[in-house]
Amino acid sequence: MTEPPPSTPEHATCWTLVRTAAAGDAAARGQFARHYAAPIRAYLQHRWGGTPRRDDIDDAQQEVFVECLKPGGVLHRAQQAQGDFRALLFGVVRNVARRVEERAALAARRTVDHSVQLDGLPAAAEAQSRAFDRGWARAILREAAERHERAAADGDEGFRTRFRILALRHQEGLPIRAIAERLGIADVDRVHNAYRRARRDFRASLRDVVATRTGASPATLDDECRRVLAMLQG
């Protein structure tokens, strides 16, 4: 059976995006970089912030993308059956960071430098992993918010009102009664109900993004959404 063509990058799952980017598609490669730059940079900043290696962050981030996108690189070898794409990407950025440190240590004629020693400590390695996870989760939440905003712009007046209520509640911190007054809605219960629906609207966007970026199956999607939200608390 002939495999169907991959989706366009804007709607690709993470593994479809991987295959398309690995095949050399420029749009898919740009999409890959936009989606995954945040956790890569968060990890490197946490690992090297306050050390001489902080000046290497930009170059190291670029090296991660080279490792992923070069012929025969990580994306060429990656297979969906291998499982968690987040864990795969984390392994790449960690290995690149170690390589940068080892090159610096060799150039300075040292056996190992301070940042390599830190990586060997369980507490430091765990903190770096949490920084990566928070960057991953923030990127997903940001994309979900953008998707929700686009859906509201394309939706009916009710959807746009619900979107505005959610924004007033979470961006400006207004209580429901104050939101009702701001919008000129006399029935406060109506605003309460709209707020609950707006939260469901956002969760739908979040589910879509989590499914796309993690490759989670329908059976595991809710658990993966909770996992993403929990990463922000780490």
Image (tube, rainbow, N blue to C red):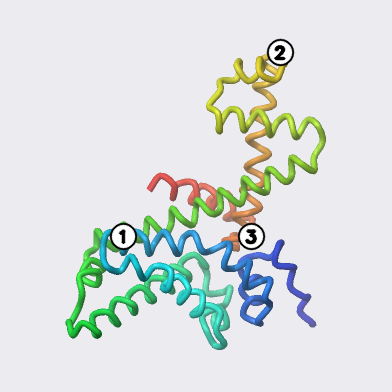
Return the mark for residue 49: 1
Q: Residue at x 20, y 70 (%)?
A: 114
Q: How many marks?
A: 3
Secondary structure beneath label 3:
helix
Spot occupied by residue 201 in the image (x, y as percentages of width and height): 68, 39
Question: Residue visible at 80% across and 31% down?
Answer: 157
Q: Which residue is mark 3?
A: 212
- The Cα atoms of the two marked residues, 3 and 2, are separated by 38 Å
User: Marks 3 and 2: CB-CB under 8 Å?
Assistant: no
Classify residue 43 by image quadrant.
bottom left
Q: Judge whether 190 appears above or below 133 on screen.
A: above
10 Å neighbourhood of mark 1: few (<14), some, or many (≥20)? few
Q: Amino acid at mark 3?
A: Thr
**Left or right: 79 in relation to 13:** left
Tell me the amino acid under the disc marked 1.
Answer: Gly
| Closer to us: 35 or 200 | 35
Q: Nearer the viewer, mark 2 or mark 1?
A: 1
Image location (x, y in percent) of residue 38: 49, 59
Mark 1 or mark 3: which comes first in sequence?
A: 1
Q: Mark 3: give few (<14), some (14-19) or many (20+) Cα within 10 Å.
A: many
Residue designated by label 2: 187
